[in-house]
Image (cartoon, grey):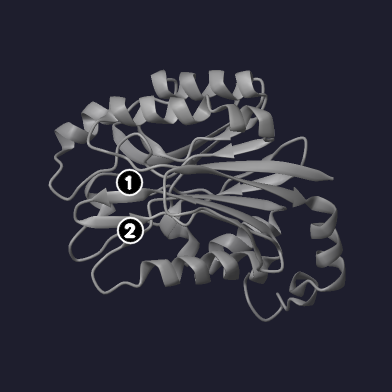
Amino acid sequence: MKIRVAGIQIGATESKKSNIDKLKKFLDDPSLKQFKPHFICLPEMFSYLPLPDDTMDTIEAVSETIGGTTAKMLAQTAEKLKAYMVSGSYILREGGRYFNSSLLFDPNGNLIAHYNKIHLFDTPDFKESWFVAPGDRLVVADTEYCRIGLIICYDIRFPELLRSLVLKGADLIFCPAAFPVAGASPGEDHWQILTRAAALHNMVYVVAVNQIGIRKPFIYFGRSVVVDPWGVEIARAPNQECIIKAELDLDYLREMRKERSVLEHRRPDLYEL
């Protein structure tokens, strides 16, 4: 079985309205409709990307509930395009706290999964935990095509999480991201290594959709990518806002796992994962 995936690589500005209006234009792009994707993924924090000098008043103003206007728009778009929609992520408020959350809608517009980012990006100069609380559960969702796992950006640096999702049955992992070049960090090099290693180590397809553009103090370099279970990049975005598209072969995935997969040679008697 072959499935089509699409990622929308865009950059968030300081205006939530402008960001959502821009996204809508990409979702209405004729090339996307012609491609007829089974899955669509957006970047992390596509509607508003917090900055170090933001206050909690700002976070409150841009946050939404799980049934808010952005969720309704994405659900309607999923139904319109007859595709599963991975919402990238945006700030949701629940029980008096804020989370960096990714929602998954099915082709009928139903919410079928909800993931709160587990690993928060905390550095000496910028701490995601200033604004949001960490999630506390892994998410693998069933679809009519395959099982998919959800992670967000910094999560990809934690191999335990990726392996756990695959052990729970994930064939395809979506990674919406706002992955920057920051300080001495060679962001682009890390991005390529991490996305390819995640796919190869776990014999899984990885669709990683990054932001692109400057949002001081960070530079987001894009390079959204689709990686196959042999660690090969089968699609990579150019250096601009765009739609990245790829076809995934689930029969190939099964074949690779049967013939070559290290998953069959694990020694869980010697380690926990």
Relative to residue 102, is residue 133 drawn left or right? left
Asked whether residue 158 is in view, the answer is: no
Residue 212 locus on image (x, y percent): 37, 50
On the image, the x and y values in percent for residue 80 come to 61, 18
Q: Residues within 10 Å of mark 1 (few under 14, many from 20)?
A: some
Distance between mark 1 and mark 2 Cα atoms: 11 Å
Q: Which residue is mark 2?
A: 121
Looking at the image, residue 164 sits to the left or right of residue 208; the answer is right
SS of the residue under disc 2: loop
Residue toward you, 232 or 69: 232
Residue at 32% across / 40% down in the picture?
A: 12
| Residue shown at the point (19%, 52%) measured from the top left | 216
- The kind of residue on which mark 2 rests is Phe
Mark 1 residue element = loop
For disc 1, the marked residue is 133
Q: Are marks 1 and 2 in contact (CB under 8 Å)?
A: no
Is 204 placed above or below 147 here?
A: below
Pick whichever of labels 1 and 2 is earlier in the sequence: 2
